[in-house]
Amino acid sequence: MKDTILKTNYQQRQNKKTLTVTAFALFSLFFGAGNLVLPPLLGYKSGSLWWLVTLGFCISGVLIPILGIMAHAKLQGTLFDFAKKVSPMFSAIYCYIIYGIAISLPSPRTASVTHEMAIQPFLDSSSLLTSLIYFILVFVFAINRSKIMDLLGKLLTPGILIILIAIIAATIFSLDFDFVTSEMERPFSSGILEGYQTFDAIGAVVVGAVIIISVNIKEKTASFQEKKTLIAKAGLWAGIGLLLVYGGLILTGALFGGSFDDEISRTALLRGISTETLGQKANFFLSVLVSFACFTTAVGIVTGTADFIKGRFNNSILAYRVTALISCFLGVMVGQFNVGHIIAVAVPALMFIYPITIVLILLNVIPEQWSSSKVFKRVVSVTVLFSIPDFLGSVGLGDHISHYTTWIPFNGYQLGWVLPSLVAFLISNLVHGKKQA
């Protein structure tokens, strides 16, 4: 009896340890250093309406990504499995687009953040030189697949978190809750759209598969349901962590409203807040930690993309190396631009692919009886169709098509796909239910 109790207690401790490690791993994967520059400026511009932009930002930057992890817990497959109910060809195209965006935008953005946070304030060197050296090192690490990156990732995230918590706490306890009046017209939808820039929903469908593989290796004896529960709980805890950090940074930016130039850049604002709250030394350490964390993110994106292409070409080592080389070349070309420019360039791609990703996540997370293959096809088709006006609007063609799109609900908020997709889902299930009856 005593042995049974001891064995049960040991198993419970192991389960808690596994849950903690998995939750922290998920948080680290989502907590890209490039994302840190987004919430402070959003809060800075929102002022008294910071809570509305926080709500919007956390829907697209926290809730949807965590639902993506829960969908992975249900599927326990790969990125390809997310869209295969639409069709295998659509799923393959979707995967190529996702990885193409990953190496063209968030990966180069890490080099730009590194230059603006850690190089530009201290050295008089060009962003092209920074980007070139940065991605040469990324290529070397991606080819050699060094385990140092995993170790650095585990050490860097706690370091960044400690400094960020200190910044948030120092701001909250030292400044009066006196917000500037906001002139932001659409705070809620602005928060949602800025949350797109975290790339966390895309990250969920990509890195979720990595977590599945890791759990399968470490928990070989666990049942499907046990692994599903573990991943879902870990995702929930990771989401709470992201919510607190993102919300805290938005609030911090709002409390500093009016303290800096209205045209201040995202990276300059983060540096300025860090200096004001903790001093120059802390700002230096934050810059160094963010730079290393950006680097591990870039290596992860390049390696993951190269692995995908390698798998599509019968595990060809040549395909892996060529993909890594192309990814790093794109990184050098795009990474030399400033963070604001890369974020602006990313908008059209995100306005098209993010709605599709969100819909795929939601369809995969709901019960099977409401997400048949036919439902997938109809809802995703409608989402693609109604994402086109938002995409065209983001590239400056909105006025040319406004006569045809004014009737679409929420079109003015660049969320014209939401209601049509919901209606398609409801009608598809109603028709499907009647046929089954």
Image (cartoon, rainbow, N blue to C red):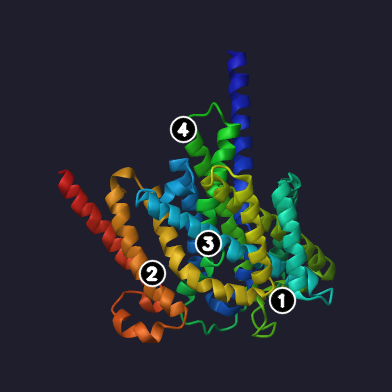
Asked whether 28 or 205 is in front, the reply is 205
For the residue marked with disc 3, what is the amino acid? Gly
Q: Residue 203: x and y, percent? A: 55, 55
Mark 3 to mark 2: distance in Å? 19 Å
Please tell me which residue is depicted at 70% across the width and 55% down the height of the picture. 296
**Closer to the camera, 207 or 26?**
207
Report whether 56 appears left or right of 27. left
**Which residue is tagged 2?**
387
User: Taking 92 as reference, is 320 left or right?
Assistant: right
Q: Determine which residue is flagged by label 4.
A: 224
Q: Secondary structure at mark 1?
A: helix
Give the Cα separation between the discs numbered 4 and 3: 28 Å
- As drawn, the label of residue 268 is 1
- Kindly report the distance in space between the C-alpha atoms of the residues bearing marks 1 and 3: 22 Å
Q: Are marks 1 and 3 in contact (CB under 8 Å)?
A: no
Q: Name the residue tied to disc 3.
A: 61
Amino acid, disc 1: Ala
Q: Which badge, 2 or 4, comes first in the chain's sequence?
A: 4
- Mark 4 or mark 3, which has the lower sequence index? 3
- Estimate the x, y position of residue 8 in percent, counting from the top left: 58, 23
Q: Earlier in the sequence, mark 2 or mark 1?
A: 1
Which element is circle 2 on? Answer: helix
Q: CA distance from mark 4 to mark 1?
A: 47 Å
- In the rendered image of this protein, does residue 174 appear above or below residue 149? below
Alpha carbon distance from label 2 to label 1: 33 Å
Residue type at mark 2 is Ser
Asked if the residue at tag 4 contacts the one at tag 2, i.e. Cβ–Cβ closer than 8 Å, the answer is no
One can see residue 277 in this view: no
Query: Quadrant of residue 177 in the image?
Result: bottom right
Amino acid type of the residue tagged 4 in the rendering: Phe
